[in-house]
Amino acid sequence: MSKVQWLGDPIADCKASVANKLLCESFAGTVSIATASYPLQQFYKDQCIEYLCSKGSMPDSPQDLPQPPGCKDDQANKDKCAAFGSALAATTGAAPLGPFFRDQCLEYLCAQGKMPTPGDMPLPPPPVPPPQEPPQTKPSTPLAPAGAAPTKETPWGWIVAGTAAALGLVWFFAPQTRPWKENPWTRSLSHETTAKLMLARVILNQGGYDARGRYWGVGAPLYAAQDDDGNMRYVRAATREEAKRQFPKAKWYR
């Protein structure tokens, strides 16, 4: 008996299967409801069919599928993240950071396929110190030779003022005493605090540096806990729940 050869196209048959279409239609409906993106239901259905027929299994989540085109340009997404950023900035008492939280919300929404929570937001950048104007100096009278007796023409006032200004500049620009070295976002937060806290993970690269170039070393994940007054503490923990347990009396933003 001769062997029978299948001449059909398995991919085409898979995409034409009514059962597969129903599975992906249900998946797309669930995703569009969860992400409040109803206009994208057909997009998720088509991408689900592509994934199912190429991988041989249903996708587990929207992260398994390509992102819809124009996610960051979608006006509905912009409006949702603008409201989220304004509310979070008002809650933390940092109104100028509304645009920062709005942009980070868009990044998260388009990467994860869902709206973030306050704990999903990265730390805001440190405040930029105001520009410092150099001290104004006036042309001084030539100094008297060494050992010369003071005279009415000796500008002692200018000498003292110039010396004080020079010492002030040395102190001002010294790295260990620079006035903006103390970042208000890194004020110490007690492990026994009873305040309501926001928890965010600090992303480190393989060398142990964060996005601002600070070195933390490698090891367990790094988390930052912050209260409404800007007090903060960094902790190492394997999971978010373990990090929260280091503040047993605190309450948490969802």
Image (tube, rainbow, N blue to C red):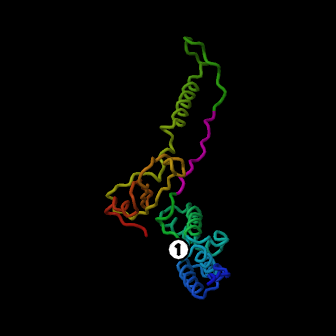
Q: Position of residue 17 (x, y in %)?
A: 61, 86
Residue at the spot of label 1: 61
Residue at x-position 39% and y-position 51%: 188
Picture quadrant of residue 95: bottom right
Q: Position of residue 226 (x, y in %)?
A: 43, 59
Q: Indicate left or right for 201 with 1 as reference.
A: left
Residue at x-position 54% and y-position 76%: 57
Q: Position of residue 26 (x, y in %)?
A: 55, 85
In the foreground, 108 or 54: 54
Q: Where the N terminus falls, by quadrant?
A: bottom right
- In the image, residue 133 lies in the stretch drawn in magenta: yes
Q: Main secondary structure of the magenta part?
A: loop
At label 1, which amino acid type do we have?
A: Ser
Q: Which residues are magenta?
A: 124-136
Residue at x-position 59% and y-position 22%: 155
Task: Please tell me whether mark 1 sits on a helix, a strand or a loop.
Answer: loop
Q: Where the C terminus falls, by quadrant?
A: bottom left
Q: Position of residue 100 (x, y in %)?
A: 57, 61
Q: Does residue 144 lie above or below 220 as drawn?
A: above
Count neighbours of disc 1 (C-alpha within 10 A) and say few if under 14, some if 14 to 19, many if 20 or more. few
In the foreground, 42 or 11: 11
Q: Which residue in the rendered view is the most extreme toward the front?
A: 1
- In the image, residue 125 lies in the stretch drawn in magenta: yes
Q: Does residue 180 lie above or below 157 as drawn?
A: below
The number of numbered badges drawn on the structure is: 1
Q: Indicate left or right for 115 with 11 as reference.
A: left
